[in-house]
Image: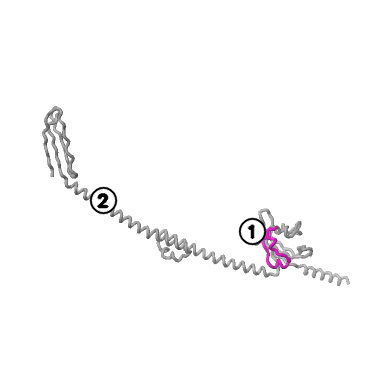
Amino acid sequence: MTVSNINLLPAEKDTVIKQPKKAPKYNIVISKMLYTWDNKPIAQIVSNSEQSFLQESVKYSKIQMWESIIFVLFILSVITLFLIRSVDKPIRIISTCLEESNPQVLERLKVETTEFGYIAVLIDQFFQQREELKQEVEERTKAEQRARDIIDKAPFGVHFYDLNSENQLVFTGANLAADFILAVDNQRFIGKTIEEIIPNFIGTEIPDAFRKAAKAGERYDSDKVDFDNNGVHEIFEVHAFQIAPNSIAVFFRDITKCKQAEEAMRASEGKITKS
């Protein structure tokens, strides 16, 4: 509804023009002053129009606002559910797998064509490789133990040396037969150099030959190595060879009696020849 009023104003010089009253909330008020040729106000036109569409627009805007809020909440709910299913659940499965070291919990996740499915496949492969490596280590440990048992029960002695950065051969271990043959506990020599263990090797070719065996893999063999064992002169058959870079094994056996028998036989043959 529109209401228009024309207010005639007195033409006094000090006439004060009244401003239209503030319109109601949904009304539109238009005010227009009329002037004479000498720029004096003579009338005021006021149009007050009640606009119902403004009220409807405000109501509609409120409805749209609530619809937008509901729509946003719905989208957020969908995103949350999606994240729970697509991110949180796979992460929980992977965490459980790693905490319990149980790759079986990944079976359903591995078939998914997502990044988490790919990660699950990689984790499963890791567990498989770890199990294979574990079995390989166990088998190798058993093989090494069997080799150690064979060496310990062998009728010859074995010494192990490592060549350090100062070109010294350092004793690292021995078999049980070495203790019996040399009548000494070889464990007390661990960490000592070959010259400290066997001083009568100093000035001979043996230390350098053993170093060549450790460095370059040059095998050393001799059937006449003199050894002073607590004042007793003994003769050993020695074989040294590389078992790993800068590491050697020295196999030896006491052939003193064999050499003495050979010398006795040669002496006996010499006497027969002279007679």
- In this orientation, does residue 216 appear? no
Marks 1 & 2, CB-CB < 8 Å contact: no
Give the numbered dot on residue 164.
none
- Mark 1 neighbour class, 10 Å CA radius: few under 14, some 14 to 19, many 20 or more: few
Q: Judge left or right: residue 226 versus residue 33.
A: right
Q: Distance between the residues labelled 1 and 2?
A: 80 Å
Residue range corresponding to the magenta coloring: 170-192
Considering the numbered disc 2 on the image, is that residue within a helix, a strand or a loop? Answer: helix
Q: Name the residue under label 1.
A: 245
Q: Mark 2 points at which residue?
A: 65
Q: Which residue sits at x=82%, y=70%?
A: 264
Residue 118 image-quadrant placement: bottom left
Q: Judge left or right: residue 229 versus residue 166.
A: right
Would you say residue 181 sits in the magenta stretch? Answer: yes
Q: Position of residue 91 (x, y in %)?
A: 42, 59
Which amino acid, by three-letter code, is at mark 2?
Met
Residue 275 image-quadrant placement: bottom right
Which amino acid, by three-letter code, is at mark 1?
Pro
Q: Which residue sits at x=84%, y=69%?
A: 267
